[in-house]
Amino acid sequence: MADDTIVQAVSRALDEAPERNFRETVDLAVNLRDLDLNDPSKRIDEGVVLPAGTGQDTQIVVFATGETALRAEDVADKVLSPDELEELGDDTDAAKDLADETDFFVAEASMMQNIGRYLGTVLGPRGKMPTPLQPDDDVVEVVNRMKNTVQLRSRDRRTFHTRVGAQDMSADEIADNIDVIIRRLEANLEKGPLNIDSVYVKTTMGPSVEVEA
């Protein structure tokens, strides 16, 4: 369960958000300090499964064949075959469109080499190379887990953002998501909590509210 200070910050962000005629997301801004982000090994780049879910649809594309492809059709937004992968390799615009509209890619491990060959220059710079699916992995389980996953990615910037929920989720649910993210960052950063300068939560169009340490 999240600390009361996180719940209070989320409640205030939700209360102060102006009325809109669309469902807003709730986002977290994290400001880092005392890190040389020019060194790729110091950057944040990892997926975190949110306990209360993202509150939004997560677009997932699976590259697969045979039985795995058939099972993936029940849970993924698109399932692409080796032939369709090759076609994408010949159509850069279509590949870029797919990359931009997709949150996560999953691929059978046997297809990873060709994905690198055909789509590496499109997916690589976007940080969207597929998660390899090993022969013993359950594609349904992997995809369902990814539907509740957000990617924390700082690149070389001191400030980065991630989605932590939606405006119609409860403050407690969103706070639990934030708590998991902060704990993961503290565990993985070089100096733990000392590398986190400040954290803010806000709805899409609402004011930022600082999450006090």
Image: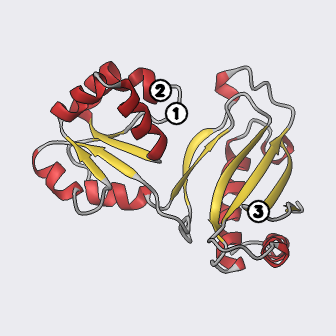
Q: How far apart are marks 3 and 1 (CA)?
A: 26 Å
Indicate the position of residue 146 as horizontal and vertical percent values. 43, 55
Q: Mark 2 points at which residue?
A: 124
Task: From the image, state whether disc 3 or disc 1 is nearer to you.
Answer: 3
Q: Is residue 104 left or right of residue 87?
A: right
**Labelled disc at residue 80:** none
| Amino acid marked by disc 3 | Met
Question: The N terminus lies in which quarter of the figure?
Answer: bottom right
Relative image position of residue 40 (x, y in whole percent): 65, 23
- Residue appearing at x 82%, y 48% in the figure: 193
Residue 81 seen in this snapshot: yes
Q: Name the residue under label 3.
A: 205
Q: Residue at x 71, y 73 (%)?
A: 20
Which numbered disc flags the more N-terminal residue, 3 or 1?
A: 1
Amino acid marked by disc 1: Gly
**Numbered tag placed on residue 127 in the rendering:** 1
Q: Where is residue 59 in the image (x, y as percent from the top left)?
A: 42, 54
Check contact, mark 1 vs mark 2: CB within 8 A: yes
